[in-house]
Image (cartoon, rainbow, N blue to C red):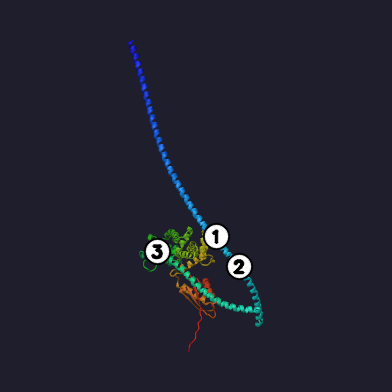
């Protein structure tokens, strides 16, 4: 029994302990939730406070921006109002000026109307006077016919002949005065243009020869060049197309050819063979092929360098290579590529000074002698060949015309063509640019003097200034002033057609009267 009571008491104690534990656990959970809720509410209040603070800051910034915007708007309005006021003042001034001009025009219209009425009156008066004058003339003509015994037509003929003779003399005198005045002005301007162009160019003069000398390490190398029974030298001359001269000059071998390109390639081949030491026909052909490729690249670079130096654009690579070949062409000893570059600079300066197309002129002057690379191969005038090359590669027609007209093979039709012609002549004829053999020089002198003395009325003729000027003395009894002018033109035209000469030839025709008396 006691055990049962103890068991019940133990169970009651356990249940009561459990209940009390559960109660305190629940109470702690409620307190925990209250604490968490309180923390959440505090966090929310802090966030609300921050939001309110941010809202206040935004409102302040908004108020500030609104004030700035109002200030800017006010400034814009003020500026616009000032501009409107300014425009209004300008319009008022313009209206006032127009009113004054209108009044002035009204006065001019009135004045013109008055003058027109006066002119009409004068015109009627002139018509009346003309009719009266015509009557007087008819009466005088009738009297003159009866006195002179000549009809009106015969009198007119005699009078016209006298007037024509007198007018011809007056015309000659006036023509000479105008010609002298024009010559002074034109020569001065032309001289200034040419001098400035040449001065700004200031390029070097390069004169080519027909031989190239190669130095040898020793004279024993000459034997290797000649080879057994002359086999090597024959193979060299035959393959390279040049003449090889081996004389008594110590350590020197001379390569001769009228073609500078062949001479240049030949010298490079021979130098390579001398370095290599093997001189056989097969080796010669092998080295020739190698050096030809190297020279082709060099020619392309020479053309490109010339284009870069002159500063032109739009030149196809094919034309650049043809231009580079001009380095190996000469004209009267002058290197044609340097002549082309020089002509381009001169043409550009002349074009700038007279207001022509300087770019087109410079490009045409640079390309004007392209045909010289082909003229000895296919024949024909080099100026026309130059034009055909330019046209083939799509250059503009006005540029082509300036190129192919520089020797007047076709009529010149543009100022740029005339400038290219002048630049070519300046580059070719300036001192030191070219040289000729004495035979050609003497032959040209004889031809020039022979053309002048072949005309009737020419007493004597002297070729001066190395053939660039001719003095022609005429008989004043046979050649009057009008005929002298025509004769100088005829001589110039014949020289252009019949004589080959670098640059230009000036024809000076001298007509003078001499009166001699003797005092005794």
> Which residue in the structure is indicated by mark 2?
116
Mark drawn on residue 225: 3
Place of residue 51 in the rendered image (x, y in percent of width and height, measured from the top left) = 41, 37
Residue 99 numbered mark, or none: 1
Res 443 visible: no
Q: Left or right: 478 with respect to 6?
A: right
- Above or below residue 278? Residue 462 is below
Residue nearer the viewer, 283 or 383: 383
Task: Identify which residue is drawn at 42% across, 42% down.
Answer: 61
Left or right relative to 483: residue 31: left
Q: Earlier in the sequence, mark 1 or mark 2?
A: 1
Question: Are circles 3 and 1 on residues that touch, CB within 8 Å?
Answer: no
State how far apart marks 3 and 1 are (Cα): 102 Å
The image position of residue 339, as x and y in percent, is 45, 65
* Disc 2 to disc 3, C-alpha distance: 102 Å
Q: CA distance from mark 1 to mark 2?
A: 25 Å
């Amino acid at each position: 029994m006691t055990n049962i009571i103890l068991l019940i008491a133990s169970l009651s104690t356990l249940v009561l302990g459990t209940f009390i534990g559960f109660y305190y656990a629940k109470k702690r959970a409620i307190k925990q939730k209250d604490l968490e809720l309180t923390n959440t509410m505090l966090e929310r209040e802090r966030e609300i406070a921050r939001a309110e603070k941010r809202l206040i800051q935004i409102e302040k910034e908004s108020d500030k921006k609104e004030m700035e915007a109002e200030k800017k708007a006010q400034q814009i309005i003020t500026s616009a109002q000032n501009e409107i006021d300014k425009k209004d003042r300008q319009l008022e001034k313009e209206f006032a000026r127009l009113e004054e001009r209108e009044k002035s025009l009204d006065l001019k219209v009135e004045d013109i109307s008055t003058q027109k009425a006066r002119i009409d009156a004068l015109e009627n008066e002139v018509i009346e006077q003309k009719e009266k004058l015509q009557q007087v003339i008819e009466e005088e003509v009738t009297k003159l016919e009866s006195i002179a015994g000549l009809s009106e037509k015969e009198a007119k003929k005699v009078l016209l002949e006298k007037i024509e003779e007198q007018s011809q003399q007056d015309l000659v005198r006036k023509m000479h005065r105008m010609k002298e005045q024009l010559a002074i002005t034109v020569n001065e301007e032309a001289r200034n243009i040419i001098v400035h162009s040449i001065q700004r160019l200031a390029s070097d003069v390069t004169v080519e020869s027909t031989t190239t000398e190669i130095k040898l390490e020793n004279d024993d190398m000459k034997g290797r060049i000649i080879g057994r029974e002359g086999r090597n030298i024959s193979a060299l001359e035959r393959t390279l197309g040049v003449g090889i001269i081996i004389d008594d000059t110590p350590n020197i071998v001379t390569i001769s050819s009228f073609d500078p390109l062949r001479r240049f390639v030949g010298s490079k081949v021979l130098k390579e063979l001398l370095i290599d030491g093997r001189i056989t026909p097969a080796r010669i052909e092998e080295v020739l092929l190698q050096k030809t490729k190297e020279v082709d690249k060099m020619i392309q670079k020479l053309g490109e360098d010339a284009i870069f130096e002159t500063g032109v654009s739009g030149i196809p690579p094919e034309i650049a290579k043809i231009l580079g070949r001009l380095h190996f062409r000469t004209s009267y000893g002058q290197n044609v590529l340097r002549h082309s570059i020089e002509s381009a600079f001169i043409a550009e300066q002349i074009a700038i000074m007279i207001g022509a197309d300087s770019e087109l002129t410079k490009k045409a002057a640079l390309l004007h002698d392209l045909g010289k690379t082909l003229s000895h191969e296919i024949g024909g005038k080099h100026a026309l060949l130059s034009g055909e090359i330019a046209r083939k590669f799509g250059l503009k027609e006005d540029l082509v015309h300036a190129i192919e007209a520089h020797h007047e093979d076709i009529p010149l039709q543009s100022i740029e063509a005339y400038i290219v012609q002048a630049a070519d002549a300046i580059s070719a004829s300036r001192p030191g640019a070219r040289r000729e053999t004495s035979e050609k020089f003497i032959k040209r002198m004889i031809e020039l003097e022979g053309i002048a003395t072949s005309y009737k009325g020419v007493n004597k003729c002297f070729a001066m200034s190395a053939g660039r000027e001719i003095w022609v003395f005429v008989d004043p009894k046979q050649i009057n002033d009008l005929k002298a002018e025509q004769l100088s033109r005829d001589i110039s035209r014949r020289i252009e057609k019949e004589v080959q000469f670098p640059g230009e030839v000036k024809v000076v025709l001298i007509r003078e009267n001499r009166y001699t008396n003797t005092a005794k």
